[in-house]
Image (spheres, grey):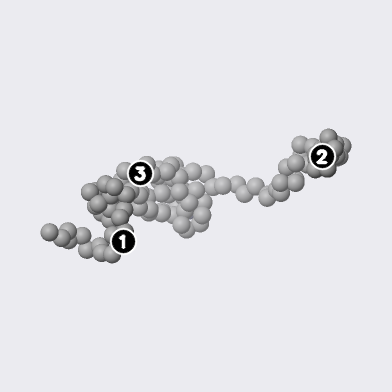
């Protein structure tokens, strides 16, 4: 007796055990709507058994959107991009760098 799922061609090879029992292409889905600070709504489908994330990127503006329409997450402040070197320079003085470089070179040369 064929199931009248209307979805065909999904059973290529053998799926994980148990998958066909549940009906692999008929997994229950729920629509979750997220709202961003800009008033956009983004509707996303999740598997019913999955826990929907608290926030989702707005499809309209890319800002974080939450499930509470009246209390959307605040818009992201865009931090200026810092390179890895910039972070290192915040932590290390030039003198530190000289020492670290010397140690690294010594290790590389096998003389430490
Ligand atoms: Zn938005």
Q: Of discs 3 and 1, which sits in the foreground?
A: 1
Cα–Cα span, label 2 and label 3? 52 Å
In the picture of the structure, the residue carrying the numbered disc 2 is: 110
Does residue 93 show up? Answer: no
Mark 3 secondary-structure assignment: loop
In the image, is 42 to the left or to the right of 48? Answer: right
Q: Earlier in the sequence, mark 2 or mark 1?
A: 1
Within 10 Å of the Cα at label 1, are there few (<14), some (14-19), or many (20+) other Cα atoms?
few
Cα–Cα span, label 2 and label 1? 55 Å
Q: Residue at x 31, y 53 (%)?
A: 15
Q: Nearer the viewer, residue 21 or 86?
A: 21
Mark number, residue 12: 1
Q: Earlier in the sequence, mark 2 or mark 3?
A: 3
For the N terminus, the quadrant is bottom left
In the picture of the structure, the residue carrying the numbered disc 3 is: 50
Mark number, residue 80: none
Q: Of discs 2 and 1, which sits in the foreground?
A: 2
Q: Of discs 2 and 3, which sits in the foreground?
A: 2
Q: Residue at x 50, y 48 (%)?
A: 64
Q: Is mark 1 within 8 Å of ligand 1?
A: no
Q: Nearer the viewer, residue 19 or 27?
A: 19
x, y percent for residue 57: 48, 51
For the C terminus, the quadrant is top right
Q: Residue at x 32, y 49 (%)?
A: 16
């Amino acid at each position: 007796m064929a199931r009248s799922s209307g979805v065909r061609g999904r059973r290529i090879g053998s799926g994980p055990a148990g998958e066909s029992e549940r009906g692999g292409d008929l997994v229950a889905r729920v629509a979750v709507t997220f709202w961003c600070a800009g008033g956009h709504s983004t509707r996303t489908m999740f598997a019913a058994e999955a826990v929907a994330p608290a926030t989702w990127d707005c499809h309209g503006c890319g800002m974080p959107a939450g499930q509470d329409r009246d209390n959307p997450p605040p818009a992201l402040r865009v931090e200026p991009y810092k390179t890895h070197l910039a972070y290192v320079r915040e932590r290390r003085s030039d003198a530190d760098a000289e020492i670290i470089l010397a140690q690294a070179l010594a290790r590389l040369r096998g003389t430490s």
